[in-house]
Amino acid sequence: MTASPKAHPAPEGQPEEPTEADRLRDLLRTPAYRKVLVFSALIGVPISLAAFWFLVGLHELEHVLWTDVPEALGWDTPPAWWPLPLLAVAGTIVGLVVARLPGAGGHVPASGLHAGGASAAALPGVIIAAAASLPLGAVLGPEAPLIALGGGLALLFRRLVRAPATPQSTALLGAAGAAAAISAIFGNPLIAAVLLIEVAGVGGPQLFVIMLPALLSSGVGAVVFTGFGRWTGLETGSLSIRFPTAAPRLDTGDVVWSIALAAGIGALVHLVIIGGRLTAAFVASSPVVRTVVCAVGAGGCAALYAVSTGRDPVEVASSGQATLAGLAADPHAWSVGALLAVLLFKGVAYALCLGSLRGGLVFPALFLGAATGVLLSPLPGLGVIPGAAAGMAAAVAAALRLPVSSVALVVLVLGNAETIPVVILAAVTAFAVAELLPRGPVAGHAAPPSRTA
């Protein structure tokens, strides 16, 4: 056994500086911080229920618009033009929210994930913009609206119980509420806490200050969310994939190709993000009209994909969550031409939606990375599963710029330990490549509400 590290003695006549453990112990003895922990646990219950019904509503509305209505009109799958009117409606609603409501519907997706800035006043705009974007065909995921929903609800509950509002409590409760909400979509409270901690970018004692409420709230929320989902039998969408075969043992080819694959994906995803920022700059001066233009452009990408391949336009006009599960279940059902087409059209639609509509970056990045890995899996020495694993890790790391969260998320989605080495190598490689490339324009977090379009 080794002795625990001790603080270096201070020079004679000066008080000894407290260690990080001492600071943490003192923090836990503070009544105000203990109240924050208790409140974080309590708000995990209602926030997880709100997140559950939010996701159920999005899932059901998407099913109605893309399955039930086309079938009622006599089509087995939506016709090629179907995304155009839906995304025109989405663009109109989101544009009006951005121009008229507080908070502008949340952060611009092209600016990345953000844990701060949540407010109760912005909640109506966030909910309306997400409900208009995601079920109607935006190439975005639900994680960013969930973060805003959880953080805003936490601050609203604090106001209802008339708890004192301080900058520290605002930051802690916002992170705790966001963790409770986002654990719903990822199905794992640890992923939610890791993601928010890495987004916050803190370390040392400050890491524990934020980590404890976030872990506590996300854990309580995950228990409630899981139990309530089983009790109701309602679906919210599951972020997990299953390949038809078990993951193979990695060899030299898998490792070498994964690094090369990750470097290329990192550069390409970085270009897509820059495209999203350019789109955001284009939309900012006239949010109503130009949001509609970009949304219809994304719908046009889905229509062109359907016409050129004969496949379902929802494979482009969606977050990619369900399509990713289908790709993993039967990767050989996708021809080389179909994979090239979905990468091209979905990549362009992704960039347009990143700068105009509201949602998150994770789900489309996962699909684009997996599709690239499957496309290149015939390379000598590279298997389908290692290629898809490396592709997903690289794409998410390049899009989010959060390598630790990207590794944890992809490992959770894959559900196996065999591919962890290539996942780590790919995430680090893509992150480094994306960081070394020119950053391009900076997208604003959210445009201030305006009375003019």
Image (cartoon, rainbow, N blue to C red):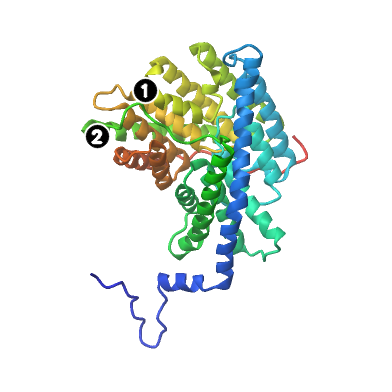
Question: What type is the residue that disc 2 sits on?
Answer: Arg
Q: Which residue, as the protein is rendered here, is positioned at the far front?
A: 231
Residue at image location 54% in from the left, 12% down from the top = 307
Picture coordinates of residue 73 (x, y %)?
66, 13
Where is the N terminus found, in terms of image quarters? bottom left
The answer to which of 285 and 264 lies nearer the viewer is 264
Mark 1 and mark 2: Cα distance apart in space = 20 Å
Q: Kindly identify which residue carries mark 1.
A: 375
Apparent side of residue 380 relative to residue 86 in the rendered image (left or right): left
Identify the residue at the far bottom of this view: 13
- Between 395 and 232, the one lying in front of the other is 232
User: Is 419 situated left or right of 51 in this image?
Assistant: left
Q: Secondary structure at mark 2?
A: loop
The image shows residue 342, relative to residue 51, as above or below, that is above
Residue 30 sits above or below residue 413 on the image = below
Q: Residue 221 location, x and y as percent?
A: 55, 50
The residue where tag 2 is placed is 249
Residue 89, picture quadrant: top right
Residue in the foreground of this view, choosing between 430 and 330: 330
